[in-house]
Image (cartoon, rainbow, N blue to C red):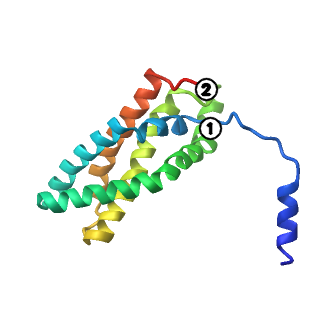
Amino acid sequence: MKILLPAGLAFAAPLPALGNLVWPALEAETRVTSVPIIALSLVLEYCVIRLLFQKGVGRSILYTIIANAVSGALGLVLRPLSGLAWEVSLGALVMWIFSWGTYNPVAWFSVPVIGGAVNAALELLAIRLIGKEKFTRKNFLVFWVANTVTVGLSTLWVVLRPPML
């Protein structure tokens, strides 16, 4: 109880509100969770799962659905947070070196690379837990490439047709 009072007072302190804080990964998330990208992702990852794990149609569909449900639910938070982590770490260095803002070519390139890695890790973890499959470097790299393609397409979609406010 003694710790709750100082914590409550800290939240009561007036702080500046930054309601306009947006970064490329958050923008791309609007398209990563769109029906066309999800459909493309399911088809692509079904093929990858069949190739990597050599399972039948039913088991491959099960792996695909569960893996994408996990990466969809957890990735909804983790992908934008990984983009924010980029913005305050290496992204800040890139912005400082080149005197660029948040929406720069390196940031847009990093969105699918980092988002693809987050999705690949979540999906392989789900497949490992439900199917007892191995989480190997090769599996991760193949899933990373597949997820980078789908996150990359959604990122390109945002760049070519930005969301209207």
Residue 97 position in % (x across, y down): 63, 30
Kindly identify the amino acid type of the residue bearing the numbered disc 1: Leu
Q: Can you say which quadrant of the picture contains the N terminus? A: bottom right
Label 2 amino acid?
Answer: Phe
Which residue does the image show at 53% across and 45% down from the upper left?
A: 80
Which is nearer the N-term, disc 2 or disc 1? 1
Callout 2: 10 Å neighbours few (<14), some, many (20+)?
few
The quarter of the image holding the C terminus is top right
Residue lying at 42% horizontally and 40% vertically, measured from the top left: 32
In the picture provided, is 66 more to the left or to the right than 52? right
- x then y, percent, for residue 137: 30, 59
* Quarter of the view holding residue 122: bottom left
Residue in view at x 85 percent, y 59 percent: 10
Residue tagged 2: 98
Q: Is residue 131 left or right of residue 90?
A: left
Q: Nearer the viewer, residue 153 or 105?
A: 153
Residue 121 is marked as none
**Distance from the alpha carbon under mark 2 to that under mark 1:** 9 Å
91 sits left or right of 72 in the view? right
Residue ID at (29%, 70%) = 130
Residue on which the image places disc 1: 93
Q: Quadrant of residue 83?
A: top right
Q: How many marks?
A: 2
Q: Percent position (x, y) of residue 155?
A: 43, 32
Q: Kindly tell me whether residue 46 is visible in this rendering.
A: yes
Which image quarter: residue 124?
A: bottom left
Q: Secondary structure at mark 1?
A: helix
User: Could you say where residue 76 lies in the image, as x and y percent from the top left?
Assistant: 48, 49
Residues at circles 2 and 1 in contact by the CB criterion of under 8 Å:
no
Which of the pair 143/37 is nearer the observer?
37
